[in-house]
Image: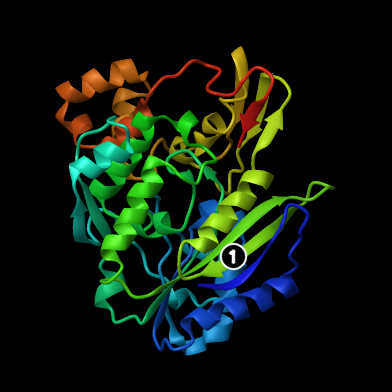
Amino acid sequence: MMYAARGSAADEITSEELAGLVNEALAGVAGARKVIALPPDITRFHSRAGAITDLVHGLLGGRLAAVLPALGTHAPMTPAEIATMYPGTPASLFQVHDWRVDPLEFARIPASYVREVGGGVVDYDYPVMASRKLVEDGYDAIVSIGQVVPHEVVGMANHAKNIFVGTGGKESIDKSHFLGAAYGMERMMGRADTPVRRLFDKALELAGGKLPPILWILTVMGRSGDGRLVMKGFFAGDDNECFAQAAALSRLVNIDQLEGPIDKAVVWLDPAEFRSTWLGNKAVYRTRMAMADGGELVVMAPGLAHFGEDPGIDALIRRYGYRPSATIRPLAREREDLAASLSARARGGSRSPTPRGRASRRKRSRA
């Protein structure tokens, strides 16, 4: 059911209004005595998840027993990042997710299902994996916090992705990323119903009885008429309806429809957020469908220090570079290290559509 819902393309939710909405949302964990929060890391600083987590702590007090940032393959947050993003939540509550060590496997989705939802682009099963902390540390409820925004792997970020990627394991993250890459980013970006989303929904169905009850708190951010970044939507519930409403609003406010192709685009990557090409490649994902054939994309990334957030993936990208799908797939069959990392293969070379993607000459999408 829904516990709080507000949002429209014209809305601007103030800090005072946000506090009231979070208070309404926490009716979803009213009976829980020991709660764990799953917010994003510093790469989603602008989601307002930091403010929401601080409000959750203020309202729940000692009932909020832990905060586990949904890192996925990202680097752990530093003490300075925690203090910046979560100034009102004690640093002692924060835990670190290690995607190579921490996850438990709850079930396996058969290859026949993965093959069906993906239209035959891959042929493997999928392990339903999430952090053992969620089930072994005695929590009565999970509060999953994050932003719904167009995403290159799943179509629209968040909801079940926060569990199965944010606290997922190597095999599950590898396989979901590669399914998205093989299916094609242009076929998914900005869509709520995609092969990877169906995979996560099935995973949630299979793991639901083993995980504590989950309260989803989802935001939608957008620009005001004068260019300020504001909260356009807040949706909280314990089922899929909150995601459906947030995704519909995000599609309205986070995708620009252009009258013609872009001949030259300059993208600035904030050094406080983007220190790797793993994340910085969003400059490509979110513009390529709008770029003209032969257009020029200039990416300014003063904080760039790594290729991968994870040291192992960073080493693979340094070794093999970024290559077209037609090159990387045969190479992966020959090299054991590359074959063992579907995530690196997905980021290093995926399906290569025509440069103009799937947007028409008249209307170009930019997420």
Residue located at (37% from left, 41% from top): 195
Horizontal and vertical percent position of residue 256: 68, 35
Tag 1: Cα neighbours inside 10 Å, few (<14), some, or many (≥20)?
Answer: many
* Whether residue 86 can be seen here: no
Is residue 77 in sight in this rendering? yes
Picture coordinates of residue 356, whole percent (x, y)? 56, 18
- Relative to residue 90, is residue 291 drawn left or right? right
Which colour style is shown?
Answer: rainbow
Q: Which residue is mark 1?
A: 235
At x 61% / y 79%, what residue is drawn?
Answer: 24
Quadrant location, the C terminus:
top right
Pick the residue in front: 279 or 165.
165
On the image, the x and y values in percent for residue 230 come to: 73, 56
Q: Please, is residue 61 above or below residue 108 in the view? A: below
| Disc 1, SS | strand
Between 70 and 251, the one lying in front of the other is 251
Front in this rendered view, residue 36 or 31: 31
Q: Quadrant of residue 183?
A: top left
Task: Return the x and y of residue 130 as percentages of the image width and height.
Answer: 29, 61
**Residue at screen point 57% across, 25% down:** 289
Relative depth, front residue between 306 and 219: 219
Give the vertical position of 331 relative to 315 (above or below).
above
335 left or right, relative to 227: left
Name the residue type under label 1.
Answer: Phe
Q: Quadrant of residue 14?
A: bottom right
| Up/down of 270 relative to 165, above or below | above
Q: In the visual, does 329 lie left or right of 64?
A: left
Residue at (26% x, 22% y) in the render: 329
